[in-house]
Amino acid sequence: MDRSEHRAVAAAILPLVGGAANISSVAHCMTRLRLGLRDRSLVQDERLRALPAVLGVVEDDTYQIVLGPGTVARVTPELQALLAAADPAPVAAPGPGPGAGPGLAERGAAIRADQRARNATPGKLLLRRVANVFVPLIPALIGCGIIAGLNGLLINLGLLPGLTPALTALAGGFMALIAVFVGYLTAKEFGGTPILGGAVAAVVVFPGVANVEAFGQRLSPGQGGVLGALGAAVLAVYVERACRATVPAALDVLVTPTVTVLVSGLVTLYGLMYAAGAVSAAIGDLAGALLATGGAIAGFVLGGLFLPLVMLGLHQALIPIHATLIDQQGFTVLLPILAMAGAGQVGAAMAVYVRLPHDPALRTTIRSALPAGLLGVGEPLIYGVSLPLGRPFVTACVGGAFGGGFIGLFHMFGDTVGSTAIGPSGWALFPLLQGSHGPGTTVAVYAGGLLTGYAAGFCATYWFGLRGLPAPAGAAAPTD
């Protein structure tokens, strides 16, 4: 797809979301175009989902259009260019389209709307805001993670010894300063001055903290990691707000930034770094111990529960945990196991495709969504297939459980499989894998988990997931 095609996709999307006047913000993550909308009723959902480039739609705090890896990063600037040049005339709310009526897509939309309402609790909204801090970091985590993996392979093979130090610097530079980026983005998300959040968080990785003593021991650079940076920046936002409310306008430019950095920085040095360091260490120890002792059982539970966590909005709590493990250990052992939920989803969709040959609309949905599912983009299959059908969602979880159990079993035997970045799953996770026994073993274990998840999700859905479903016109309902 060249630039003109990306521009055409953006041009097709714009009127279907209510036009330029209805868009308050535009951003993107790895796979989704995230739009802030002024009036949700102006969106023409069915026509939007029918666009060939659209893999699905997810409603959260923003309206998220799933376009897939790579495509979304190219469509977003084209949409932003259209917005900059557009006449911001509002678009009238759409009426029902021809042939509109209740069906699987409507049931999926209703489920999404219900889940969105259920997830609008203060705790889940906070988790969502924390997750928003880390989403912009994902491209850098992926890029640096792949470079780190390539560099490790070259070092192990003894190739290009003159290049590997440069690759080490490229891969490690971002991770060495990730606390600064977390601080900057945290302040931006929580309504403070981003550069002040970054300035306060920078103290976490500053080498000079080795000369500071807190709680009877000297601090170490990086102590507390991303959690310390997150806490420091949130504190900076509240200190800054207090200053803005009390400091005279004539002195604001001098007093507010000084007091913000001073107060937040001292609290970070003499409290947050120590506390966040203890929490970070506990997270690393717990993740390792959980899989080392629980093995297949732990993997089975984690892989099986991830899709329900997504439905409840609780999966966002795992993002800072992944980031902490990557910052602390170089990779997260949890992500490959949780990625098995997507494998179970793919297996379940394949079974639905095979068992319902007389439902062309559903089979078309599966054919269009399956490539994205294989690459770890699960929303089109979840909201378009398994969740509206009911039982296939449960059997997809069974597939994820068996895939997670497979990887957990090998972890217990010492074959650790981790990911050097957050975001991708499915086949897209292969370039980011890192483990304890070399790339060959690591890839084989992860691939074995995927195949197990596919097979278990398929078998569970084929035999147990489709009983009692209403049959499409002219077909008999599966009952065996």
Image: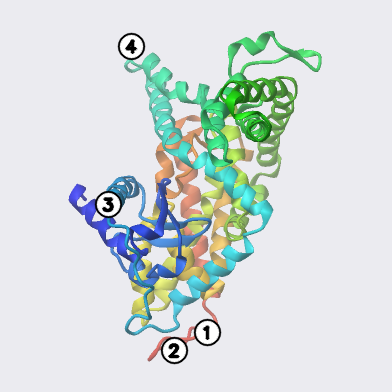
What amino acid is labelled 4 in the image?
Answer: Gly
In this rendered view, identify the residue nearer to me: 48 or 293: 48
**Upstream in the sequence, badge 2 or badge 3?**
3
Task: State the residue at coordinates (42%, 19%).
Answer: 168
Q: Tell me: 206 left or right of 357.
A: right
Q: Which residue is denoted by mark 3 in the rendering?
A: 82
What amino acid is labelled 2 in the image?
Answer: Ala
Q: CA distance from mark 2 to mark 3?
A: 49 Å
Task: State the residue at coordinates (43%, 74%).
Answer: 105
Q: Nearer the viewer, mark 1 or mark 4?
A: 4
* Place of residue 142 in the rendered image (x, y in percent of width and height, measured from the top left): 42, 36
In this rendered view, identify the residue nearer to me: 215 or 63: 63
In this rendered view, identify the residue nearer to me: 69 or 286: 69
Residue lying at the far right in this picture: please name it: 216
Q: Which residue is denoted by mark 2 in the rendering?
A: 476
Residue 457 visible in image: yes
314 shown above or below 430:
below
Residue 332 visible in image: no
Q: CA distance from mark 1 to mark 4?
A: 65 Å
Q: CA distance from mark 3 to mark 1?
A: 51 Å
Q: CA distance from mark 4 to mark 2?
A: 67 Å
Quarter of the image for residue 468 reads bottom right
**Upstream in the sequence, badge 1 or badge 4?**
4
Residue lying at the far bottom in this picture: please name it: 474
Circle 3 crowding by C-alpha within 10 Å: few under 14, some 14–19, many from 20: some
